[in-house]
C-alpha cells in the first residue's frame, strides 16, 4: 500500500510512459464518415493511440473501437463554451497528454487541412516542443459528391473546381469569399457549412451573373446511414433545402457537373 504521492512513485519506478519522455501528436483525417474511408495510415495511428480527441464528423465508430481496447477517448465536440475557447482547450489537451509521453491522435472528419483548423493545432504542438505529424484524409468536399454519383469534373464540361465554405453569408463584412468572381466562373463549386446560407449564396451568384438554371445538388450525411441526395437548381436551392428539411452535415455541389448524377448500385 504505497501512500506516497503518485509523482514520487513514478520516479521510483521509471517506465516508458514516465513524464520525462515526450510523446507525439498525430492529426488524422478520418474521411467523410464511413469507417472504411479512412486511410490505412490513419487506421494504424488510431490502433496505436493512447489518447484520441475526436469530433462528431468522421469515423466516430473507429474512435469508440479504440476506446474499447483501452485508449482514452476525449469527445472534444462536447466541450462547452464558445468555439474559440474550445479550440484553445483542444490544443491544451493535446499538449498535456503528449507531454505525459502519450501517443495522441487528433481525429477529424475529412482532411485536417480542409476547413479543419489543423494548422492551428500544429502550431500549438510545435510551440510546446511536441513532435507532430499529419495523416491526410479523404475530404467530404470530394468524397460526398463521389459517393452520391457526382463527378466534380467532366471532360469537355469544366476545367475548374472551387472549394468554398459557406458558413458566412455573402453580405457579411466577415466574408472572405469573392462571390462576384465565383459567379463569373463556369465550372464546379463545392460548398460546405452552407446549408443555412444556401439561399442567400444562390441569390448572390444569380445576381452576379451565374445562370439561375445551373444544377445544384445537396448531399446530406454523405457515406453514412441516412445519406440523402437532393437535386435542385440555383433558383430553387434555398426553397428545396427548406421544403425537404435538409440539414447538417451536407455538401452542396453547384455547376453543370451536378446535372449528371450516376446511379450507383
Ligand atoms: N475537414 C472536413 C470539413 C470540416 S467542416 C473535411 O475535409 O471534410 C464540417 C463540414 O463538412 C460540415 O458542416 C459539412 O458541410 C461537411 N461534411 C463533413 N462530413 C460530411 C458528410 N459525411 N456529409 C456531408 N457533409 C459533410
Image (cartoon, rainbow, N blue to C red):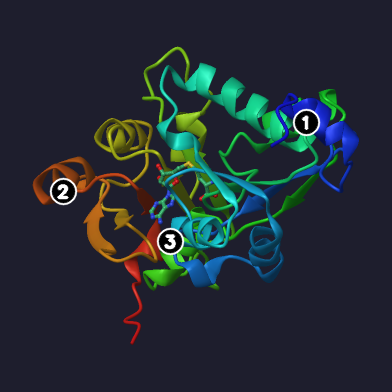
Q: Which mark is residue 240?
A: 2
Label 3's element?
Answer: helix
Q: SS for tag 2?
A: helix
Q: Residue visible at 46% across and 50% down?
A: 190
Question: Within 10 angstroms of label 3, few (less than 14), some, or many (20 or more) residues?
Answer: many
Q: Quadrant of residue 33?
A: bottom left
Quarter containing the C terminus: bottom left
Q: Residue at x 39, y 54 (%)?
A: 253
- The mark nearer the N terminus, 2 or 3, is 3
Q: Residue at x 64, y 59 (%)?
A: 46
On the rendered structure, is 151 left or right of 202? right
Estimate the spatial distance between the alpha carbons at disc 2 and disc 3, rounded to whole Å. 19 Å
Q: Which mark is residue 209?
A: none
**Mark before the other along the chain sequence, 1 or 3:** 1
Return the x and y of residue 175 as percentages of the image width and height: 47, 21
Residues under numbered marks 2 and 1 in contact, where contact means CB atoms less than 8 Å apart: no
> Quick one: label 2 or label 1, which is nearer the N terminus?
1
Kindly identify which residue carries mark 3: 144
For label 1, count other residues whose C-alpha is less than 10 Å away and answer few (under 14), some (14-19) or many (20+).
many
Which residue bears the numbered disc 1?
125
Q: Residue furthest front?
A: 1
Query: Where does the image place residue 254, in percent across and percent down from the top left?
Result: 38, 52
- Viewer-nearest of discs 2 and 3: 3
Secondary element type, mark 1: helix
Q: Is residue 184 visible?
A: no
Image spot of residue 188 (x, y percent): 47, 54
Question: Is residue 101 depicted above or below 251 in this figure?
Answer: above
Describe residue 96's horizontal placement relative to residue 112 as left or right.
right
Amino acid at each position: 500500500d504505497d501512500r506516497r504521492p503518485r509523482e514520487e512513485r513514478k520516479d521510483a519506478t521509471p517506465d516508458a510512459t514516465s513524464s520525462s519522455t515526450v510523446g507525439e501528436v498525430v492529426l488524422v483525417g478520418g474521411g467523410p464518415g464511413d469507417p472504411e474511408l479512412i486511410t490505412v495510415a490513419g487506421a494504424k495511428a488510431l490502433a496505436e493511440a493512447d489518447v484520441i480527441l475526436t469530433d462528431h464528423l468522421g469515423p466516430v465508430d473507429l474512435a469508440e473501437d479504440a476506446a474499447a481496447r483501452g485508449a482514452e477517448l476525449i469527445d472534444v465536440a462536447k466541450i462547452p463554451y464558445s468555439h474559440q475557447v474550445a479550440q484553445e482547450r483542444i490544443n491544451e489537451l493535446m499538449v498535456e497528454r503528449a507531454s505525459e509521453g502519450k501517443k495522441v491522435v487528433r481525429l477529424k472528419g475529412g482532411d485536417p487541412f480542409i476547413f479543419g483548423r489543423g494548422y492551428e493545432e500544429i502550431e500549438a504542438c510545435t510551440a510546446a516542443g511536441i513532435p507532430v505529424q499529419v495523416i491526410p484524409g479523404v475530404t467530404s468536399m470530394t468524397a460526398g459528391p463521389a459517393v452520391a454519383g457526382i463527378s466534380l469534373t467532366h471532360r469537355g464540361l469544366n476545367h475548374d473546381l472551387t472549394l468554398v465554405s459557406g458558413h458566412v453569408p455573402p453580405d457579411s463584412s466577415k466574408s472572405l469569399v469573392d462571390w462576384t468572381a465565383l459567379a463569373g466562373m463556369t465550372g464546379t463549386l463545392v460548398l460546405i457549412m452552407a446549408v443555412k446560407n444556401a439561399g442567400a449564396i444562390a441569390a448572390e451568384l444569380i445576381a452576379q451573373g451565374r445562370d439561375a438554371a445551373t444544377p445544384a445538388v445537396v448531399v446530406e450525411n454523405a457515406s453514412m446511414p441516412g445519406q440523402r441526395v437532393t437535386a435542385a437548381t440555383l433558383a430553387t436551392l434555398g426553397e428545396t433545402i427548406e421544403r425537404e428539411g435538409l440539414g447538417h452535415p451536407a455538401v452542396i455541389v453547384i455547376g453543370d457537373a451536378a446535372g449528371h448524377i450516376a446511379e450507383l448500385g
